[in-house]
């Protein structure tokens, strides 16, 4: 069986590591790292580059079957706000454009975009259930940058027929057990297995679609509306982060 090849950006991060661990037997990997290479398998292809480098991103996307875009700007404690905002502009804004344009140029039919619940964070602050069809209400510049990525994905789907799935990831510590206790219905934790299986469902969905999905494990009924992930790509979480209300 000829396994499809995936370009994974941000492959050294928690989500990238989980996807590599859980989906290795189903796909081949081309892994994009920013500055250092962690332990990888001999069959993995390695790209060391900055997302903001357009030419390198076009080259990185050549010959793959899908792109999983996880790379983000990583601010560190003590960074001035202006510096972090500039990092977001270069990585989350420019870099995300580069990835979608690389997919278009190379004829890559599918992009999975790692978004965040912070795109609608003010609903959470007000105690409302966040829904994928509600107007965006970002609670940070990070959330703003991910709202931009979702809008870009919608454009590339409508203009070029690309399948684009945006996953609004909640609390992801890359564990198989919850990292904190949540009251009934208020879970924000997403297990490694549930994240990997949602990614696989997006990769295997049969028809070109655009979708925005909240991603949390079971027990999040009072936080997120996740029904459309089941309806569009057939994903349902298997692990539990909190009791149902």
Image (cartoon, rainbow, N blue to C red):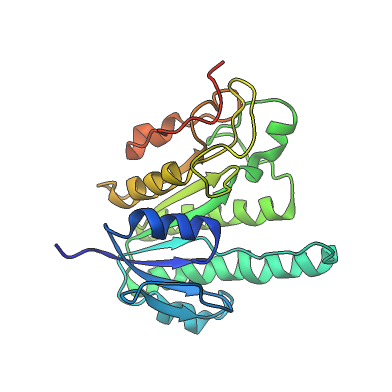
From the viewer's perspective, is 211 left or right of 188? left
Residue nearer the viewer, 214 or 45: 45
With respect to residue 53, does 193 lie above or below? above
* Quarter holding residue 89: bottom right
Residue at image position (65%, 57%) is: 145
Residue nearer the viewer, 71 or 61: 71
Residue at image position (37%, 45%) is: 197
Where residue 41 sits in the image (x, y, percent)?
Answer: 36, 72
Where residue 190 sits in the image (x, y, percent)?
Answer: 52, 40
Q: Residue furthest left?
A: 1
* Quarter holding residue 187: top right
Query: Which quarter of the image is occupied by the N terminus?
Result: bottom left
From the viewer's perspective, is 169 left or right of 110? right
Residue at image position (54%, 31%) is: 241
How many discs appear?
Answer: 0
Query: Which quarter of the image is occupied by the C terminus?
Result: top right
Where residue 169 sits in the image (x, y, percent)?
Answer: 55, 45
With respect to residue 200, does 41 lie above or below? below
From the viewer's perspective, is 114 left or right of 145? left
Q: Residue furthest top?
A: 245
Residue at image position (41%, 36%) is: 229
With respect to residue 138, does 188 lie above or below? above
With respect to residue 56, does 233 lie above or below? above
Where residue 116 sits in the image (x, y, percent)?
Answer: 59, 47
């Amino acid at each position: 069986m000829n396994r499809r090849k995936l370009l994974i950006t941000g492959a050294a991060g928690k989500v990238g590591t989980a996807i590599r661990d859980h989906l290795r037997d189903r796909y081949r990997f081309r892994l994009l790292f920013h500055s250092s290479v962690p332990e990888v398998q001999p069959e993995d292809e390695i790209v060391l580059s900055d997302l903001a480098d357009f030419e390198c991103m076009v080259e990185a996307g050549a010959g793959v079957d899908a792109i999983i875009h996880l790379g983000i700007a990583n601010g560190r404690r003590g960074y001035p706000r202006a510096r972090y905002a500039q990092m977001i502009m270069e990585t989350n804004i420019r870099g995300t454009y580069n990835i979608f344009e690389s997919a278009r140029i190379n004829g890559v039919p599918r992009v999975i975009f790692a978004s965040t619940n912070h795109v609608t964070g003010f609903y959470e602050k007000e105690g409302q259930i966040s829904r994928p069809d509600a107007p965006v209400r970002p609670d940070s510049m990070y959330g703003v940058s991910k709202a931009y990525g979702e809008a870009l994905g919608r454009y590339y789907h409508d203009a070029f027929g690309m399948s684009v799935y945006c996953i609004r990831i909640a609390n992801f510590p890359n564990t198989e057990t919850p990292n904190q206790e949540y009251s009934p219905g208020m879970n924000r934790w997403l297990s490694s297995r549930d994240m990997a299986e949602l990614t696989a469902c997006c990769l295997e969905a049969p028809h070109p679609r655009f979708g925005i999905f909240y991603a949390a494990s079971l027990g999040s009924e009072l936080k997120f509306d996740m029904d459309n992930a089941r309806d569009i790509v057939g994903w349902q979480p298997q692990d539990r982060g909190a009791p149902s209300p």
